Image (tube, rainbow, N blue to C red):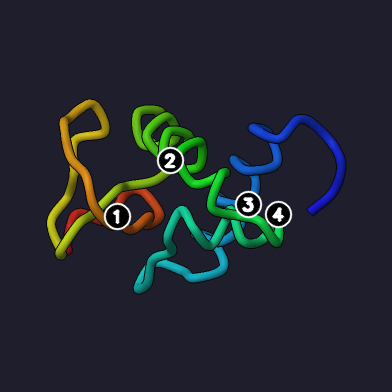
Amino acid sequence: MGAGPLPDRLRAAILALACARGEGSSTCPSDAARALADEWRPLLPQARELARELARAGEVRLTQSGRSLDPDGQWEGPIRIRLAGHAHG
C-alpha cells in the first residue's frame, strides 16, 4: 500500500476499504491489516485503535451486530467500519 509510517498506511487502508465498500457495506479492521502485511494479526490492535480515531473524527462509523458503537466506549469483539454519515444499521 506504499511507503510511510505504519499508522498512516493503516489509516489510509481503513479509509480506502470503507470507501471501496460504499455506503451499503462495511469493512473490518483485519481487512486493513491484511492489506499491509502477510503477518497481519500483530497489526490488528493498532488497526482497531485507528478505527476508533477515525470514528472520533467523524470519518467513519463503527458498528457491532448492526448497532452503532461509541468510539470512546468499552467494547470488544468483532467490529465493522462504515462510511460516516449514515445512521441506519
* Label 1, label 2: how far apart the Cα atoms are: 10 Å
Look at discs 4 and 2 and give the one toward the viewer: 4
Picture coordinates of residue 73, whole percent (x, y) = 17, 30
Residue under the image location 59 percent in, 40 percent down: 11
Residue under the image location 39 percent in, 45 percent down: 60
| Mark 3 vs 2, N-terminal side | 3
Q: Amino acid at mark 3?
A: Ala
What numbered label is drawn on residue 36? 4
6 horizontally vs 61: left or right: right
86 horizontally vs 41: left or right: left
Callout 3 touching callout 2 (CB < 8 Å) = no
Callout 1 touching callout 2 (CB < 8 Å) = yes
Residue under the image location 37 percent in, 57 percent down: 82
Return the residue at label 3: 13
Q: Amino acid at mark 2?
A: Ala
Picture coordinates of residue 50, whole percent (x, y) = 48, 35
* Label 3, label 1: how far apart the Cα atoms are: 16 Å
